[in-house]
Image (cartoon, grey):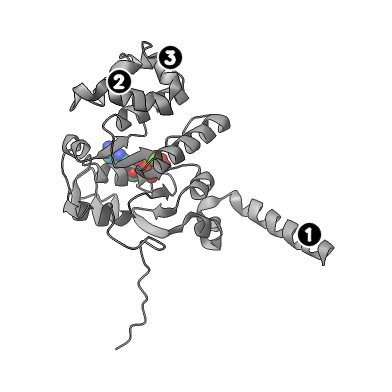
Amino acid sequence: MSTTVTERDPHAGAPLGEPLLLAEDVVAGYLPGVDILRGCSLALHPGELVGIIGPNGAGKSTLLKALFGLVTVRSGTVTLAGEDIKNHRADSLVRRGIGFVPQNNNVFPTLTIEENLQMGLYQAPRRFAERFEAIVDIFPTLSERRKQRAGSLSGGERQMVAMGRALMMDPKVLLLDEPSAGLSPVRQDETFIRTRKINKAGVSIVIVEQNARRCLQICHRAYVLDQGTNAHSGPGRELMDDPKVIQLYLGTLAADVEKADADRAGSAQISG
Ligand SMILES: Nc1ncnc2c1ncn2[C@@H]1O[C@H](COP(=O)(O)OP(=O)(O)OP(=O)(O)O)[C@@H](O)[C@H]1O
Ligand SMILES: [Mg+2]
């Protein structure tokens, strides 16, 4: 018997094989009786850089928190390399190889850079020297300023401290919530370049981004969330060219695309 309804693949374009991190049909919320995530799914395969975009309040941060045990998952599944991690505590998830950089308040302002990085390694303090070296290789500024209090740093520098702290435990998976928020365009670019570098070094990454266009440019795949559910997913470049995604979620990009199309048509006429 054929069915008239075609189920959309929630993980369109994902590689074959077992995902490293998998959330399926996750329902979660903060207040009793109020579900913020209403059946969200996300897969992160080994080596992938996966983006999450969507309007304010869509549940992007809540999804990252649900993956990291910071908001109760009411139904659905969350697994790491096939093993159940649903509602496991954040400290146990850190031990199992997940790092999380929250959207806000992500440094200890009264502690120095070095002390902030030590906090990231409180479960394995003996490895400090070795890990510190690896982190300052990515963020050289952190070494020069190691004795400076995090509260006196610029937004971009704080973001480096927060990312550095999450990387101290040498995670397999890194969850980043809007690492470029509030930064100048140049600093945003640096953040994206660094994120790619960390990914290329072997860390699988989920990144929530307000800069949807840049996110789709750098990610292997992305998920568009809307009102607590998956609206679209696929390779970044495909989503960038999808008229529905452009119209609903990329806003100003629509004008750019129309202009690019017009330019292409114009040059085709000239050359034709
Ligand atoms: N601690 C909380 N207690 C109660 N409700 C919350 C809490 N945190 C978030 N919410 C609600 O959950 C919904 C989704 O919030 P969330 O922070 O996940 O959105 P988001 O997609 O990350 O938005 P933004 O782009 O603004 O960061 C919002 O309606 C928000 O008000
Ligand atoms: Mg958010």
Looking at the image, is 232 positioned above or below residue 188? Answer: below
Determine which residue is flagged by label 3: 144
In what element is the residue under mark 1?
Answer: helix
Give the residue at x 50% y 52%.
249
Asked whether residue 60 is in view, the answer is: yes
Looking at the image, is 125 positioned above or below residue 79? Answer: above
Determine which residue is flagged by label 2: 116
Q: Which of the marked residues, 3 or 1, is nearer the chain's N terminus?
A: 3
Determine which residue is flagged by label 1: 267
In the picture, measured across the screen, residue 23 lies left or right of residue 214, that is left
Give the residue at x 35% y 17%.
113
Q: In the image, is the residue at mark 3 within 8 Å of ligand 2 by its beta carbon? A: no
In the picture, measured across the screen, residue 60 lies left or right of residue 213, that is left
Q: Amino acid at mark 2?
A: Asn
Give the residue at x 32% y 55%.
43
Quarter containing ligand 1? top left
The residue positioned farthest toward the top in the image shown: 147
Q: Nearer the viewer, mark 3 or mark 1?
A: 3
User: Could you tell me if the residues under marks 2 and 1 are in contact, i.e. CB atoms within 8 Å?
Assistant: no
Task: Name the quadrant containing residue 120.
Answer: top left
In what element is the residue under mark 2?
Answer: helix
Task: Name the quadrant containing residue 110.
Answer: top left
